[in-house]
Image (cartoon, rainbow, N blue to C red):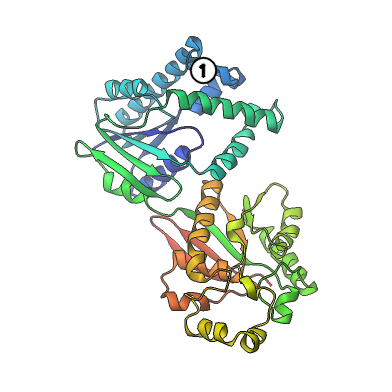
Amino acid sequence: MKKLYVAMVGLPARGKSTLAKRIREGLEAEGLRVGIFNNGELRRTRLGRDSTAPEFYHPDNAEGRARREELAQENVAHARAFLAGGGNVAILDATNASRARRAMLEARLTDHPLLFVECRNDDPVLLEASLERKAALPEFAGKTRAEAIASFRQRMDYYERMYAPLEDECCWVRVDSVQNRILEERLGARVPFFHRIRDILVSDWVRNLYLVRHGETTYNVEGRIGGDPELTAHGKEQADALARHFSRVEVTHIFTSTRRRSSMTAAPLKAARPDCRIMALPEFDEIDAGLCEGMRYEDIQSDMPEQYAARMRDKYNYVYPQGEGYVTLRERVERGLKRALFIAGDAPGVLLIGHQAINRMILSHFLYRRTEDVPHIYIPQNQFYHIVATQRKKLFELVPFM
């Protein structure tokens, strides 16, 4: 059977390791033997905290450069041995930032084809979130959070000095690792398993997304739209029931909007699961009703009849005066969803506590719906949608929790 080397390329915190794991999972499901050889893991094993200081990565640090080269050469040897021993695909997971490093890989890995996969991501919000995650690594255990972030930021700066994007290499593909989109590809020869790998690169990869609507609010009871109301007593009971249900479910990340009803729904779960990472994203804020914020629909009908009629004619394309509509909401909601999934990385479970319109737009991302039907997708407050979406598996189910 044909064999392949895959070398990841990209600056730190761009999603290389997450993508490498997805490639392995997708190919292993095809019956292939896949190994990942991560330079960072090897460095931590061999050098420990001696390699934590940012100066270890300074381009002018000859000793640090030599140690990093030794580690790269060692993993190359491991990858060659893996394929020689019956493996099918060996993934070299490292920055491979310089042309010199990639030239070394091309010179050493001549027994089988070599494919470079470059990960690009310049979203400042995601880079900051990635820095937070990196700061929690065991190698920074002796530092404060601020010191760890500053240290890793300096490390990234040194990598940026030596970084050169793919250009002259023989076979490569450049990927937007947030949007799961191929930016550019250059294949100089037939690459084994490439069609399978390419499909993985552009596929959503959601192991378990639990999509929840916030609990009942005072505005829900009064029939008002928008605003920033608090939960009712019944809404708090719903939040408690949600926390009890997910006490038995593996969830590592919880995303909310910046609205009180979303964060209040998350509060009992946060108290019960202090190990979960919780993050509020404004992209998940409910649709902005503009001049109609806080109004009841019957008030809009009587006070603004033309607006009411326009909305009834075409709910998807209608835009509230000085506000938003479903048609204008899509871009920010999809941006928030991509950010949340990137931040969660390879997490086994992600909980997202959104709003009615927001959750409808998220569901429409995974499920085909005619635009005129999107504003009518059923979004209850006592059930959640469980979504699995990978290259090989699609699952959508509505699950009650009280």
Residue 135 sits in quarter: top right
- Number of numbered markers: 1
Residue 2 in the image: state x and y as whole percent: 23, 38
Question: Where does the image place residue 255, in percent across and percent down from the top left?
Answer: 62, 55
Outermost residue to the top: 63
Q: Residue at x 20, y 36 (%)?
A: 188
- Residue beneath the point at 42% across and 59% down: 393
Q: Quadrant of residue 211?
A: bottom right
Q: Is residue 352 above or below residue 10?
A: below
User: In the shown orientation, is residue 228 left or right of residue 332?
Assistant: right
The C terminus, quarter of image = bottom right
Residue on which the image places disc 1:
58
Mark 1: secondary structure: loop
Q: Position of residue 208 (x, y in %)?
A: 53, 57
- The residue at 73%/54% (across/down) is 270
In this image, 237 relative to 133: left or right?
A: right
Q: In the picture shown, does residue 305 fall above or below 67?
A: below
| Residue, far bottom | 302
The residue lying furthest to the right in this view is 233
In the image, residue 380 sits, relative to residue 93, either above or below, namely below
The residue located at (38%, 57%) in the rendering is: 392
158 vs 296, nearest the viewer: 296
Q: Amino acid at mark 1?
A: His
Quadrant containing the N terminus in the rendered view: top left
Q: Position of residue 127 (x, y in %)?
A: 54, 40
